[in-house]
Image (cartoon, grey):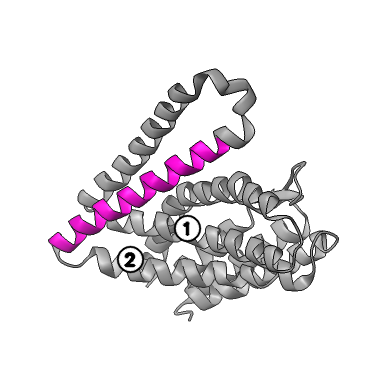
Amino acid sequence: MFKNIRQISLASLFVAITLLLGFSRIGYISLPTPAGAATIMHIPVILAGIVMGPWFGALVGSIFGLSAVMYFSHIAPFWVLFPARPFIGIVSGLVYNFLLSFFRSQKKLKNSTAFIISFVVFSFAYLSGIYIVREWFTESLINYTLEFSFLIALISFIIAFLILFMIKEKEGEIVAIGIASFLGSMTNTVGTLGLAAIFKIFPLGIIISIGILHGIPEAIIASIICPPIVVLLKRLIKESS
């Protein structure tokens, strides 16, 4: 798993950062919602999964899970709070490795993939934006529904176009990191909220709202923050090899 002293040091740093964020509660941002808090704890887990590999990512994710159990066991039991956390690192690492090799394949395959990914991103962003407006701002924006629908569509189009541009301009690694970060974060959201639904911790409507208001912003933040950090860390590892 570790090829040199720098990688060992980096692995130790990931563990130390996760322990600090988790057990000092710096990594949890208290909010007046049923979930209790938003989090940035998924960031070091995703970074560990992509840079150090899926199984080391699972180890760092387990630390995240233990801290979540310590702070939020009054909201949900261990079997709801813990299981999804190790899979953040596993999913982000595996998705990154797959997409990186996928984007390096034939040009036609890359172009078709770029359009598919862009369309999925546009659809996801647009539908999420419409949901947030309708569920949380309906009364104040009731007279501006068409205008806000157009604004949400425009923002979604810009995001999708930027992703399409990056893939077509041979920035496949950046896109791979961004998508892996997004899906790794959503693994936490879908996995934890899915277990909350199965064990009836919250009503389904509350679970969907938490997913939209917590999960999507956390995933977007991860997909923005992680790519430059991963590129920098991989460059440092390569220089030390």
Q: Which badge, 1 or 2, comes first in the chain's sequence? A: 2
10 or 200: which is nearer to us? 200
Residue under circle 1? Answer: 181
11 or 124: which is nearer to us? 124
- The amino acid on which the numbered mark 1 sits, given as a three-letter code, is Ser
Q: Quadrant of the C terminus?
A: bottom left
Residue 206 forms part of the magenta stretch? no
- The amino acid on which the numbered mark 2 sits, given as a three-letter code, is Leu
- Left/right placement of residue 51 relative to residue 163 reads right
Q: Is residue 204 visible?
A: yes
26 or 137: which is nearer to us? 137
Residue under circle 2? Answer: 99
Residue 232 vs 224, above or below: the answer is: below
Query: Total number of numbered labels?
Result: 2
In percent of width and height, residue 173 lies at 32, 58
- The segment highlighted magenta reads 107-132
The residue shown at (43%, 40%) is 126
Residue lying at the far top of the rendered structure: 143
Residue 172 vs 84, above or below: the answer is: above
Callout 2 secondary element: helix
In percent of width and height, residue 220 lies at 50, 47
In percent of width and height, residue 69 lies at 78, 66
- Left/right placement of residue 194 relative to residue 123 reads right
The residue shown at (76%, 54%) is 25
In percent of width and height, residue 13 lies at 60, 65
The residue shown at (34%, 71%) is 98
**What main secondary structure does the magenta stretch of the protein show?**
helix
- Left/right placement of residue 115 relative to residue 230 reads left
Alpha carbons under labels 1 and 2: distance apart: 12 Å
